[in-house]
Image (tube, rainbow, N blue to C red):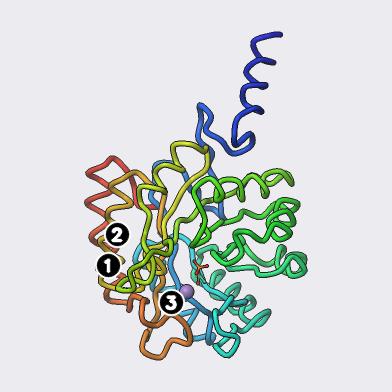
């Protein structure tokens, strides 16, 4: 067997043949923003799109303060069917307009394979939420289109299950995948979930994919979001996703954990010197 064939065989026999670690790491481009290179990328925005003014003001604010990608949910996977479920298609339109006006690409969650065709031409990247990490029909369908996928870890999933979920997407042909650790469930109730920073680093070692973390959903506590973003940057992860709202007290979802504008600006200021100290940029 030739050396190349032997290397390939070793690779395919590996646990993660498509997304497993290789000598070069992958980068994923969302709009004009590259994740997985030198820059630490901040993705920020409200949990849910609520009004045109809310999403446009937020997009402008996060952009002015150095975030590179807007987030916002239009199709919301709520634990209770009686909670606000998102604005659906109208929400995606509002996101699209806000993103174009502010000059930032956006990511939004998709819940069902049947929505992909409608959304693919309109979004810059798809998000798979924690509750859908095991939805293999959704993962396989996202693998058959070419928009990037931000794949959150299931809150009860092992690290290997999370990487195998990425293999599902990659098997369809789409390896533009960013992994996002968003907290796992443990016995404590004091923080909403537990941010598994060590797990995120383990996954970054064993795959070629960029790995980011979401301290907003992980802690449910605004005051813990900044310190964990700083830790993620110092530890060498590729970015963060955080929730920001112009008036968290009136938010229709996840208001308790959202940063208000002042706190977000302060956080971005704190990240700058850390990025410099560890030889990174703030992307
Ligand atoms: C979200 O990003 O708003 C969200 C619902 O996240 P998760 O799937 O991590 O709970
Ligand atoms: Mn949320």
Residue appearing at x 54%, y 38% in the figure: 26
Residue 98 image-quadrant placement: bottom right
Left or right: where 260 falls relative to 132: left
Q: Mark 1 highlights which residue?
A: 224
Give the alpha-carbon distance from disc 3 to disc 1, as whole Å. 21 Å
Percent coordinates x, y for residue 180 in the rendering = 48, 55
- Tell me the SS state at disc 3: helix
Nearer the observer: mark 3 or 1; the answer is: 1
Residue 248: give x, y in percent of width and height: 37, 84
How far apart are the two marked residues, 1 and 2, measured between alpha carbons?
6 Å
Element type at mark 1: helix
* The quadrant where residue 269 appears: bottom left
User: Residue at label 2?
Assistant: 228
The structure residue drawn at horizontal position 29% and vertical position 62%, both measured from the top left corner, is 268
Instruction: Kindly indicate whether the residue at mark 2 contacts the one at mark 1 (C-beta within 8 angstroms).
Output: yes
The residue where tag 3 is placed is 58
């Amino acid at each position: 067997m030739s050396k190349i064939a032997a290397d390939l065989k070793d690779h395919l026999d590996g646990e993660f043949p498509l997304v497993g670690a290789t000598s070069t790491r992958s980068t994923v481009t969302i709009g004009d923003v590259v994740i997985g290179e030198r820059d630490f990328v901040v993705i920020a925005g409200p949990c849910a799109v609520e009004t045109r003014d809310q999403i446009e003001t937020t997009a402008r604010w996060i952009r002015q303060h150095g975030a590179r990608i807007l987030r916002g949910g239009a199709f919301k996977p709520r634990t209770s069917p009686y909670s606000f479920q998102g604005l659906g298609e109208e929400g995606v339109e509002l996101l699209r307009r806000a993103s174009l006006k502010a000059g930032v690409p956006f990511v939004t969650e998709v819940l069902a394979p049947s929505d992909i065709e409608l959304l693919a031409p309109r979004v810059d990247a798809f998000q798979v939420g924690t509750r859908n990490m095991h939805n293999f029909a959704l993962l396989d369908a996202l693998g058959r289109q070419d928009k990037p996928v931000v794949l959150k870890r299931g809150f009860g999933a092992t690290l290997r299950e999370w990487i195998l979920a990425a293999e599902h997407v990659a098997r369809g042909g789409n390896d533009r995948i960013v992994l996002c650790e968003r907290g796992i469930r443990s016995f404590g109730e004091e923080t909403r979930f537990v941010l598994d920073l060590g797990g995120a680093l383990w996954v970054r070692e064993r795959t070629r994919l960029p790995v980011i973390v979401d301290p907003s959903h992980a802690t449910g506590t605004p005051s813990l979001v900044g310190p964990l973003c700083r830790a993620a940057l110092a530890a060498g992860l590729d970015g963060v996703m955080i929730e920001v709202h112009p008036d968290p007290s009136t938010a229709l979802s996840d208001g308790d954990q959202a940063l208000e504008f002042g706190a977000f600006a302060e956080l971005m200021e704190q990240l700058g010197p850390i990025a410099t100290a560890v030889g990174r940029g703030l992307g």
